[in-house]
Amino acid sequence: MKTILNMQDVVHRYRDGDEERVVLSGLSLQVGAGELVAVMGPSGSGKSTFLSIAGALLTPSEGAVTIDGSSLSGLDTKALADLRLTKIGFIFQSANLIPYLKVEEQLRLVSKLSHADAADAARRSDMLLERLGIRGRRRQYPDRLSGGERQRVAIARAWMNDPPLLLADEPTASLDEERGAEVVRMLAEGARSDGKAAVMVTHDSRVLEMCDRVLKLQDGVLVPA
């Protein structure tokens, strides 16, 4: 199994006035293609910091992060932005859709930012929306969608550039049990069928049975839950 996300001995410190706070203290994680890993932990345990470092949004104080064979060490701002666009798909708790763009426009914007061919982008957009059962909603604005539909759009948008790594931050938090399970099932099946690595930060114990591994963030490191 090819390793997509490799985090080795990651340490992260924050300054809090005159004091230094260690949030991550030697965290290591390897996630392979086709694998969905859940990360749990109480508020303040460092889950947001962990996900930000895994997503190349935050540089760790120490340690190494590699995504699909590309080391993040030494990359400048533009290179990191390009890597996020091509190698990482983000799915957020509230979907974070752009309110003035229709569903199909949400997806095609991602391709436009990466300078993809417009005709290819249109075909991929239609394919993803059909696959996720919302092609009939492609010309709707976000405020016309249900919570579950908005999260499906967020998943489709995350898949649009076919990134090897998917990162989801509490994707079921605003959904009922049925819709939450549906969203995680889509993540798991998409990761396995397309050979992607997926990491989901969650408090939702209802969906853990669909994950390949469940870890908890404890004392700055990841341990089996």
Image (spheres, rainbow, N blue to C red):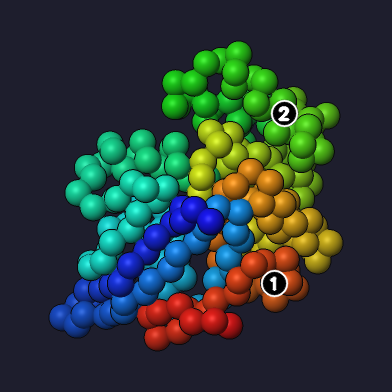
Residue drawn at (23%, 52%) of the image: 73
The amino acid beneath tag 2 is: Met
| Secondary element at tag 1 | helix
Q: Quadrant of residue 128?
A: top right
Q: Quadrant of residue 8?
A: bottom left
**Observer-nearest of 4 and 219:** 4
Give the answer, above or below, for where 21 lies relative to 126.
below
* Label disc, if present, on residue 127 of the rendered structure: 2
Q: Position of residue 186 (x, y in %)?
A: 73, 51
**Observer-nearest of 18 and 163:** 163
Residue 169 visible in the picture:
no
How many residues crowd mark 1 within 10 Å: few (<14), some (14–19), many (20+)? some
**Spatial separation of the CA atoms under disc 1 and disc 2:** 28 Å
* Label disc, if present, on residue 221 of the rendered structure: none
Residue with the most extreme front position? 1
Q: Position of residue 117 (x, y in %)?
A: 52, 16
The amino acid beneath tag 1 is: Leu
- Number of marks in picture: 2
Report whether 76 appears left or right of 161: left
Q: Quadrant of the C terminus?
A: bottom right
| Secondary element at tag 2 | helix
**Residue under pointer 1:** 208
Residue drawn at (45%, 64%) of the image: 30
How many residues crowd mark 2 within 10 Å: few (<14), some (14–19), many (20+)? some
Residue 33 visible in the picture:
yes
Residue with the most extreme left position? 18
Closer to the N terminus: mark 1 or mark 2?
2
Q: Position of residue 24 (x, y in %)?
A: 34, 75
Residue with the most extreme bottom position? 219
Residue drawn at (30%, 50%) of the image: 71
